[in-house]
Image: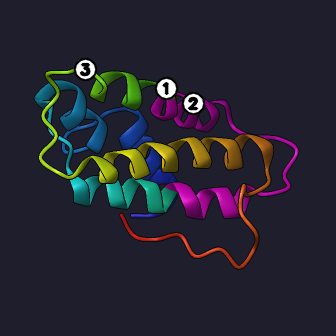
Amino acid sequence: MDDLALLRREFDAEDGSFLLQLRCDLHWDKEAFSRLEQAMRRVCARQEGRDRLERWLVEGYWYLADFVPAHTGHPDFPRPEPPEYYEAALERLHDLQTWFVSGCSPYIPEHVWPDL
């Protein structure tokens, strides 16, 4: 599946998506999150410097960066991973939102994004 198709599935919270599992099952699927954020990074790189962005993409990046921290911040949300993992993941969503909307990565070009 190409990155835009994957993001469309994720942003629409289709069956098996990270977002659907998070929202309905209260389950943070690390593999699904990894696929999602990697696709988001690749799309950011391809969109960098473009003057026009598709609304559904802008809405998706915004929604994830806003909804995920709010939803998972609830005290009853299950967090089996160390707190540092979730902090890094939420920071990643914010950084990706910034990169996508501004068209400029918040990091130097040589930056290596660590796996989450």
Q: Earlier in the sequence, mark 3 or mark 2?
A: 2
Please provide the residue range marked out in magenta. Answer: 40-65
Which residue appears at 85% of the width and 55% of the height?
A: 49
Query: What amino acid is at disc 1?
Result: Asp
Residue 51 lies within the magenta run: yes
- The residue located at (79%, 43%) in the rendering is 102
Residue type of the residue flagged with mark 3: His
Above or below: residue 32 compared with residue 2: above
Q: Secondary structure at mark 2?
A: helix
Name the residue tied to disc 3. 74
- Name the image quarter holding the C terminus: bottom left
Residue labelled with disc 1: 66
Dot in front, 3 or 1: 3
Residue 62: mark: 2
Quarter of the figure with residue 46: bottom right
> At numbered mark 1, what does the secondary structure look like: helix, strand or loop?
helix
Image quarter (top left, top right, bottom left or bottom right) of the N terminus: bottom left
Q: Is residue 39 above or below residue 16?
A: below
Q: Position of residue 44 (x, y in %)?
A: 65, 56
User: Considering the numbered disc 3 on the image, is that residue within a helix, a strand or a loop?
Assistant: loop
The residue type indicated by label 2 comes to Trp
Of the residues tagged 3 and 2, which is closer to the observer?
3
- 15 left or right of 114 in image: left
Q: Residues within 10 Å of mark 3 (few under 14, many from 20)?
A: few
Locate residue 65, reporting x and y percent: 50, 34
Q: Nearer the viewer, residue 108 or 60?
A: 108
Q: Classify residue 115 by image quadrant.
A: bottom left
Per the model, the C-alpha gap separating discs 1 and 2 is 6 Å
Judged by depth in the image, the label closer to the viewer, 1 or 2, is: 1
CB contact under 8 Å: marks 1 and 2: yes
